[in-house]
Image (cartoon, grey):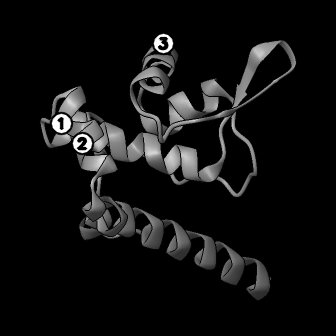
């Protein structure tokens, strides 16, 4: 059950979808989960040292959950809060980045959704 107050990062058509309980995500999946085109994700990898997807066969990128959360945080800083690339990079590398409220809210929201899914499975 989602409430409007749970929305952290909106898109033109509403909230971003919840992150599925998978270990790895392709660049296409991350693009859909974060509302950002794949070429933008590749560019952000060059600009933000915190964003380091695993590269495997044929240089294919595989993002982990923390990478997806980082992409959402970068997206929020750039698109919602109006930071420049340099400003967003500085914000993420600063000491306050670990205490960033938006990332904390994202993690809590995601945990809540996962716990609700577990509860739904247990009630079957």
Going by the picture, which residue comes out furthest to the left? 82
* Mark sitting on residue 90: 2
**How far across and down, in percent of the image, does residue 23 sit?**
76, 51
The residue carrying mark 3 is 39
Q: Secondary structure at mark 1?
A: helix
- Hey, which quadrant is residue 36 in on the image? top left
User: Residue visible at 76% across and 77% down?
Assistant: 121
**How far across and down, in percent of the image, does residue 33 sit?**
51, 39
- Hey, which quadrant is residue 81 in on the image? top left
Which of the two residues, 100 or 80, is positioned nearer the viewer here?
100
Q: Are marks 1 and 2 in contact (CB under 8 Å)?
A: yes
Would residue 65 be found to the left or right of residue 97 on screen? Answer: right
Pair 2/3: label in front: 2
Q: Is residue 24 above or below residue 44?
A: below
**How far across and down, in percent of the image, does residue 85 sit?**
24, 27
* Mark sitting on residue 87: 1
Q: Are marks 2 and 3 in contact (CB under 8 Å)?
A: no
Q: Secondary structure at mark 3?
A: helix
The answer to whether one can see residue 99 in this image is: yes
The answer for how far apart the CA atoms under marks 1 and 2 are is 5 Å
Pair 3/1: label in front: 1
* Mark sitting on residue 28: none
Q: Is residue 2 above or below residue 29?
A: below
Going by the picture, which residue comes out furthest to the bottom? 123
Which of the two residues, 6 or 46, is positioned nearer the viewer here?
46
Going by the picture, which residue comes out furthest to the right? 57
Question: Callout 2: 10 Å neighbours few (<14), some, many (20+)?
Answer: some
Q: Count up the numbered dots.
A: 3
Mark with earlier residue (2, 3) = 3
Which of the two residues, 43 or 4, is positioned nearer the viewer here?
43
Would residue 120 be found to the left or right of residue 81 on screen? Answer: right
The answer for how far apart the CA atoms under marks 3 and 1 are is 21 Å
């Amino acid at each position: 059950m989602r409430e409007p107050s749970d929305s952290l990062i909106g898109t033109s058509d509403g909230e971003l979808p919840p992150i599925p309980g998978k270990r790895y995500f392709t660049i296409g999946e991350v693009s859909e989960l974060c509302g950002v085109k794949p070429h933008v994700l590749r560019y952000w990898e060059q600009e933000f040292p915190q964003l380091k997807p695993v590269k495997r066969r044929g240089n294919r990128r595989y993002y982990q959950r923390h990478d997806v959360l980082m992409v959402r945080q970068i997206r929020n800083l750039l698109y919602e809060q109006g930071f420049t690339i340099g400003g967003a990079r500085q914000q993420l590398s600063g000491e306050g980045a670990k205490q960033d409220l938006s990332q904390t809210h994202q993690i809590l929201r995601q945990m809540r959704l996962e716990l609700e899914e577990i509860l739904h499975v247990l009630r079957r």
